[in-house]
Image (spheres, helix red, strand yellow):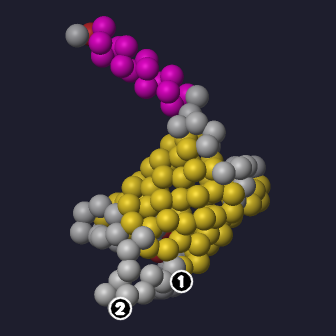
Amino acid sequence: MKKVFLTAVLAFATLFASAQIMVVTTYDGDQEESIDKLTANMGIGYSINDNIVIGGVKNGDDYDLFARYNYNEDLYISLQMATGDNEGTSVGVGYSVNVWKGLYIEPNYSMPTEKDADGNRDGEFNLGIGYRF
């Protein structure tokens, strides 16, 4: 049992040592004037390879899952799936602008995959901030 545990620890350590972790957030102008404008939608992602990132992002009191496909170095396609009491899935496209070392400004546009009660599918423009380790 000790060998299995040590092997698992070594495997996870090797996995994270070569991995790229990304911290993301979205500026939310609807929040009150506080740090919540930046931290209300904070999340963390793990780069599986150069093109695919998976992770979780806070959405209200619940957390949503997200996946991101880097089409090229700056352009990406995203998918966010709701969990818990939240409903819906949204798809989007964004552009990453490297501001300083690992800090990125990421304007993006996303829209729900399903229509709302009024029959509309209104998308939204977001301004994201990301930091890649």
* Residue drawn at (27%, 10%) of the image: 2
Q: Is residue 20 above or below residue 87?
A: above
Do labels 2 and 1 touch, CB within 8 Å? no
Left or right, 9 with respect to 93, comes to left
Say which element carries label 1: loop
Horizontal and vertical percent position of residue 98 = 75, 56
Name the amino acid, label 1. Gly
Q: For the C terminus, which image quadrant?
A: top right
Span shown in magenta: 3-17
Q: Is residue 98 above or below residue 11?
A: below
Residue situated in front as seen by the camera: 112 or 85: 112
Q: Is residue 13 visible?
A: yes
Q: CA distance from mark 2 to mark 1?
A: 24 Å
12 in magenta: yes
Horizontal and vertical percent position of residue 91 = 49, 65
Residue bearing mark 2: 118
Q: For the N terminus, which image quadrant?
A: top left
